[in-house]
Image (tube, rainbow, N blue to C red):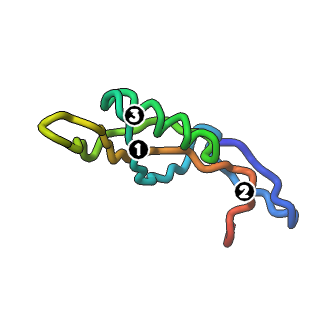
């Protein structure tokens, strides 16, 4: 444990290795493959979400036209660690 001085002067202990994560669901499509849909989704998400740590595929779908796959879609859960720059309320 380390001590951290809060902006209002209080000193509180915190674990520098502890983190809080959030999970968001995103959907991505590709005309090439599921793997490409995953890559495109994570690339786009990383433009607005910092600290992405992992992802897991919740669902996969294909769109079919005239008996041929025309589009691959993945719905994935993306986990990212929240920044620790704001003071904790009530601490």
Q: What element carries label 1?
A: strand
Query: Which tag, 3 or 1, sits closer to the chain's start?
Result: 1
Residue at image point 81% right, 63% down: 10
- Callouts 2 and 3 close, C-beta under 8 Å: no
Which residue is at 25% across, 46% downward?
Answer: 59
**Farthest residue toward the bottom?**
90
Q: Do the residues labelled 3 and 1 touch (CB within 8 Å)?
A: yes
Say above or below: 34 vs 4.
Answer: above
Q: How crowded is mark 3: few (under 14 residues within 10 Å), some or many (20 or more)?
A: many
Q: Which residue is drawn at 59% across and 39% down?
A: 46
> Extreme left residue here?
67
x and y percentages locating residue 28 in the rendered image: 40, 44
The residue under label 1 is: 28
Left of 78 or right of it: where is 4? right
Residue 30 relative to residue 12: left or right: left
State the image coordinates of residue 33 (x, y, percent, origin top left).
31, 28
**Circle 3 SS class:** helix
The N terminus lies in which quarter of the figure? top right
> Residue 38 bears which disc, if any?
3
Looking at the picture, how far across and down is residue 6, in whole percent? 81, 59
Write down the residue under mark 2: 12
């Amino acid at each position: 444990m380390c001590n951290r001085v809060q902006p209002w002067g209080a000193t509180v202990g915190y674990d520098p290795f502890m983190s809080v994560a959030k999970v968001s669901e995103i959907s991505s499509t590709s005309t090439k493959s599921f793997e490409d849909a995953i890559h495109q989704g994570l690339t786009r998400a990383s433009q607005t979400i910092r600290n992405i740590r992992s992802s897991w595929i919740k669902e996969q779908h294909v769109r079919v036209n005239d008996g041929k796959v025309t589009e691959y879609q993945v719905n994935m859960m993306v986990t990212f660690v929240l920044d620790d720059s704001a003071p904790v309320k009530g601490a």
